[in-house]
Amino acid sequence: MEQAHIEEYRAVMENYAQLAMRRQNLNTLFVGLNAFFLTGIGFLLLESHFNAWLLVCEVGAITVAIFPMNVLWLRALARYRFMIEVHSDYLKHMEQESKRELTDRSADNTSTGTYPGIISAMDARAKQSHYGTSSLEWSLAFYFVLLYPLLTLLIAALTYMIVVLHLLKPIAHI
């Protein structure tokens, strides 16, 4: 493999690693945002005792604020998956070309080396993790997308049972 190809390979591999790191930072950011909003909802639940519709409005406002962010998170994960897949495919192609060159040189007795095949080693892990986006990441993002609307509906139903139907007593202070 020529020096220019080696430098190109290193640059693409470095970009591949940076994409994976940025994806991880994105996950950390969104998990932190969701933890913040869920803590706020928990605080509201402790203070309200389900005896006023204001709680439903506040949780609904939080849902309206966080829902688009979580959808954006899912879309960003899809974008990172695509970009990581493109880089992986490009690196595989570069490896195959270099292996062909080495095979041709070996046949001519001009070289006796082997190419390490870095991307081949990464390929098994990449297939398991959808090219850098694990099923856990997807599941977590999807969970948060569904959580807030369902939580809002549950709180509205409980508030309705307490305030309108008087089926339940308001939750007392702990």
Image: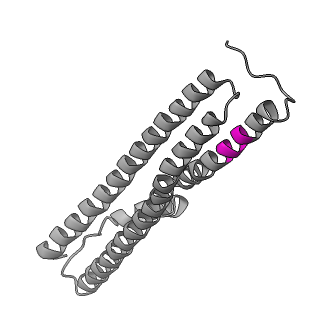
Who's the residue at 51% across and 31% down the image? 40
Res. 48 image quadrant:
top right
Q: For this view, does 154 lie left or right of residue 33?
A: right
Residue 112 percent location from the top left of the image: 24, 73
Residue 28 percent location from the top left of the image: 41, 43
Q: Nearer the viewer, residue 138 or 171?
A: 171
Up the image or down, 15 lies above or below 141; here it is: below
Residue 155 percent location from the top left of the image: 70, 38
Secondary structure mostly taken by the magenta-highlighted segment of the chain: helix
Residue 147 percent location from the top left of the image: 63, 46
Q: Which residues are magenta?
A: 150-156
Q: Nearer the viewer, residue 147 or 62?
A: 62
Res. 5 image quadrant:
bottom left
Q: For this view, does 79 lie left or right of residue 101?
A: right
- Give the number of callouts: 0
In the rendered structure, does residue 37 fall within the stretch colored magenta? no
In the rendered structure, does residue 151 fall within the stretch colored magenta? yes
Q: Nearer the viewer, residue 60 or 76?
A: 60
Residue extending farthest left: 3
Q: For this view, does 50 lie left or right of residue 79?
A: right
Q: Nearer the viewer, residue 106 or 142?
A: 142
